[in-house]
Image (cartoon, helix red, strand yellow):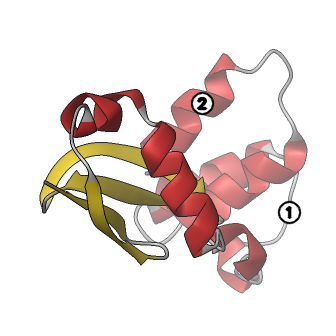
Amino acid sequence: QLMIFNNEMMKMDKRYREPCETFVKLLHPFAPHIAEEMWSILGHNESLTNVAWPEADHSKAVENTVEVVFQVNGKVRAKASVAKDMDKAALEKLAMENDRMKEFMAGKTVVKSIVVPGKLVNIVVK
């Protein structure tokens, strides 16, 4: 993941000091010698060993969306990425309006719809 982060940083037109310093701090446990060298190139005189570990921002780790599967008679027919807190009615409406779902429900009557928020919508047809 550090390499992916580094590759993305290299694509940027402008380098920012804070992400570079955070990268070096995270690299230090895996490659301490090169990290110390990079830390000194960034202009620091003290050893990286005595620097505080970066604080995590837990709000950035929260998922706001979930993938919901749409089923017809228990078989997955489509998927959608929706807001995590989407209510049952909105999920059912979204499933009913999905083109792929319409193909499998064409000419059939809806007997029942089962909606589990954040997980699935199952439309039972005959």
Which quadrant of the rendered structure holds the C terminus?
Answer: bottom left
Foreground: 57 or 105?
105
Q: Image quarter for residue 103?
A: top left
Q: Disc 1 on helix, strand or loop?
A: loop
Q: Which mark is residue 68?
A: none
The kind of residue on which mark 1 rests is: Asn
Compared across the picture, whether 31 is left or right of 100 comes to: right
**28 shown above or below 106:** below
The kind of residue on which mark 2 rests is: Glu
- The mark lying in front, picked from 1 and 2, is 2
Whole-angstrom CA distance, mark 1 to mark 2, is: 27 Å
Q: Horizontal and vertical percent for residue 7?
A: 53, 29
- Asked whether residue 59 appears in the rendered view, the answer is yes
Q: Image quarter for residue 3?
A: top left
Name the residue at 22% across, 33% down.
Answer: 107
Crowd rating for badge 1 (residues with CA inside 10 Å; few <14, some 14–19, many 20+): few
- Asked whether residue 56 appears in the rendered view, the answer is no
Q: Horizontal and vertical percent for residue 76?
A: 18, 51
Residue hosting label 2: 8
Foreground: 117 or 72?
72
Foreground: 2 or 80?
80
Name the residue at 87% across, 38% down.
Answer: 16
Foreground: 16 or 104?
104
Earlier residue among tags 1 and 2:
2
